[in-house]
Image (cartoon, rainbow, N blue to C red):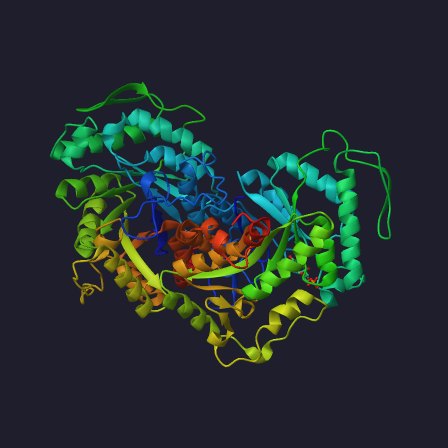
Amino acid sequence: MTDSPDFLIPVPTRGDGRDPLRRDRGDWQPAARRPLPALVTDLRPGAFGPFEHLAQIGRAAEIAGLGGALVPFDPAGEESLVVAAGLLRQSRHLRVVAGFHPGIATPVYAAKFSASLQRFVDNRLGWQVDIGLDPAIARSQGDFLQGADRYARAEEFLTVARGVWNEEGYTYEGRFYQVLAGGFQPPNSGLPFPRVYLTGTSSDALAVSARHADVHLFTGDQDVAAGIAELGARSAEAGRRLEYGLRLPVLARDDDDEAWDEARRLWNIIGGTGDGLPDPDPRTGLWHGFGRIADSAKPGLVGSYETVAAGIRGYLDQGVTTFVLEARPHIEETYRLGERLLPLFAKEIEHAH
Amino acid sequence: MPIDIYWRIGTHGDQQSLRRRVSSRGEWAPVVPGSLTPGVRDGRRDGYSYVDHMADVARASESSGFVGGLLPSFPFTDDPWAAAAALARETTTYRFMIAYQPGFLHPVQAARMSASLQRVTGGRVVYNIISGGGGPAQLWWGDRVDHDDRYARTSEFLDVLKGVWNGGPFDYEGRFYQVEGAGLPEPLARQPFPEIYFSGSSKAAIEAAGRHADYYLSWLEPFPELAAKFVQVREHSAALGRAPKFAVRIDVLARETEEAAWDEIRRGWTHVDQAALRSPDGDSVGWLRSQSFVSWPVRDYRELEVSPNVWSGFHLLRGGPAFGLVGSYEQVAERLDELIGIGVDAFILAGVPHLEEAYRVGEEVLPLLRGHDIRQASPLSPHTSLSVAKGTI
Ligand SMILES: Cc1cc2nc3c(=O)[nH]c(=O)nc-3n(C[C@H](O)[C@H](O)[C@H](O)COP(=O)(O)O)c2cc1C
């Protein structure tokens, strides 16, 4: 383990836009796209597929020096494994984490798909396995498993996936999955298993993480310190050592005033109710207003690049090393993070190599 | 006639913003953490070069509604022919407006390169014919030909290029070029001939433009002066039985509010050192014109606003021409509409940083254009006068 920070961006698989609620990039809200007036030559119709926009975001992350991109599992959005494959193939360095839940396929199939992909992209694929889905969404995906059973299945899923990945002649007899004399053969064997990202704070979730996660991801509204302590103890019992990550919305500008002006501008776009901008939490420095101006409702950091970097350092000191930085519009903000925020961690990154 | 809108690609790197005149994209500055193309990854160069950023700007431009981009050519830039060849297959609809000076490249070779590029791109090559600004830069290229002769050479160059385009045999006996039995071979011959955007404000330029320009391309100037220049070009061309269209190259700094736009200029202005300013040595009439609209030095950046939203200080904040538009999305669109009103048929817009601003201008400004209704109504409109002359109004 290293204390060099790893920065990822999330990939918006349901469109993107300059302002809150606006999703005029990509083809998810065709009506939201403002057409060019008839007098202006427009060569676009028919020339661009819907992947082009995501490809540009992936390239921005690659060019701006982000460590990776996380493509979420979102039943209402673009399919994550396919998007991940596209983003990986067009880049050389970027690691791409594809989100999915264990109900989408058998573990053998998920591993098989991933083995091909690992070979195609020089082993840069990761998995975010979403276990605790909203029950209605799970049912809409054909998955009726509930409660603790979901964690038991996830445990088996990851066990079997690693089993067939690593062992020829692999056999498994479980509650949810059975395999007889499975296991991959060359050239699909012997590859690095996708890095596994898991989430959740329940005891069940932590138990699966302790045994199977490479990285456990938190959000700012969770008690990160307590989570790390608990997972540290549990994973030590399992003879493992985890890395920790945080999903963190950020709004960073040249100085604090400019960042807060921008927060206010975005806040007022949705506003109309006249309610004021909330202050950041005086204890943690986290701002809880992102729910209204960004894709995620999680708390995050607002301020100058230095302010945001200081907030991130606070988490680094607690042992968090992976940061999924959320900012829209994704292309422009990814450039900004790469050019302005990441260089503030150059020392830590250089030190680690 | 539809309006074609291009978006420039910098061929010598880019800045993060106009706030600081520091290049951080491309190899024109030391590669440090925060540099892009090449960038630093795990303490090492990431293997990318500026062409990778150009590719992203090109793709951003085409997907945000621009038909293509102008690729400038100066001693310190990347070469636009090489860039077009490299980016041809990484783009879909993007038209490459290649800036080049006839004289550095033989017209038969220019024809061969163009024809091959047309085949590679499906006809997406456009020319920006420039004839140089003299001075040390001209000598840097190894060119001692003087101002007016450069235009004579440009004219001959285009005669030869057009002469060989559709196959041979073509003979030519000129002051600068001679060929015998020339002509592009099959199947290079008879590709669509690239549209010619012709630049130059001098008398010699306007005469040559009359013979060759599909579009007469100018830097932005105060609108009445620009309109007067168009009249001159129109007259010269009419004498030769030709009627070129008009294009303007404009930097754009557009924001949600006018105040926010000027605030960007203000931030950049704090780093400007007017004392260190020198006009380039040379014989460019266009540049002298552009400097003649303001009296230097100025005390405040707003003194460079020669008419509402028309600002002539862009060269102080980044390399390139002086004039551009500053204002809200609506204001910038209105000014562009006014230009359409005085007869502009195409724009080459630009903004720093080119990638991010391509999205902004494509999403926020272009959809606001109204264009034709305004053109009919403009007192300076060539169409108005024509209709009046014909007694149709
Ligand atoms: C829109 C535009 C683009 C130009 N681009 C270039 C260029 O890329 N490289 C260059 O050397 N000169 C460029 N020039 C300058 C011309 O070479 C020439 O110096 C200028 O048009 C002045 O010509 P004039 O003396 O006839 O007015 C450009 C000029 C204009 C108007």
Q: Residue at x 31, y 69 (%)?
A: A256
Tally the numbered discs: 0
Residue A172 position (above or below residue B130): above
Q: Is residue B205 left or right of residue B278?
A: right
> Which quadrant of the render holds ligand 1?
bottom right
Quarter of image, res A302: bottom left
In which quadrant of the rendered image does the N terminus of chain B lie?
top right
Q: Residue at x 18, y 34 (%)?
A: A137
Furthest residue toward front: B391
Q: Is residue B76 left or right of residue B18?
A: right
Q: Is residue B94 left or right of residue A215?
A: right
Residue B220 seen: yes
> In this orientation, which residue lies closer to the viewer: B107 or A163?
B107
Residue B257 position (above or below residue A106): below
Residue B14 seen: no
> In this orientation, which residue lies closer to the viewer: A317 or B302?
B302
Could you say where residue A107 lies in the image, as x and y percent from the top left?
28, 27
Furthest residue toward left: A147
Could you say where residue B22 lies in the image, as x and y percent from the top left?
52, 66
> In this orientation, which residue lies closer to the viewer: B294 or B242?
B242
Q: Residue at x 28, y 61 (%)?
A: A265
Could you say where residue A12 lies in the image, as x and y percent from the top left?
33, 44
Residue A308 position (above or below residue B56): below
Q: Is residue A122 left or right of residue B389?
A: left
Could you say where residue B373 lies in the image, as x and y percent from the top left?
45, 50
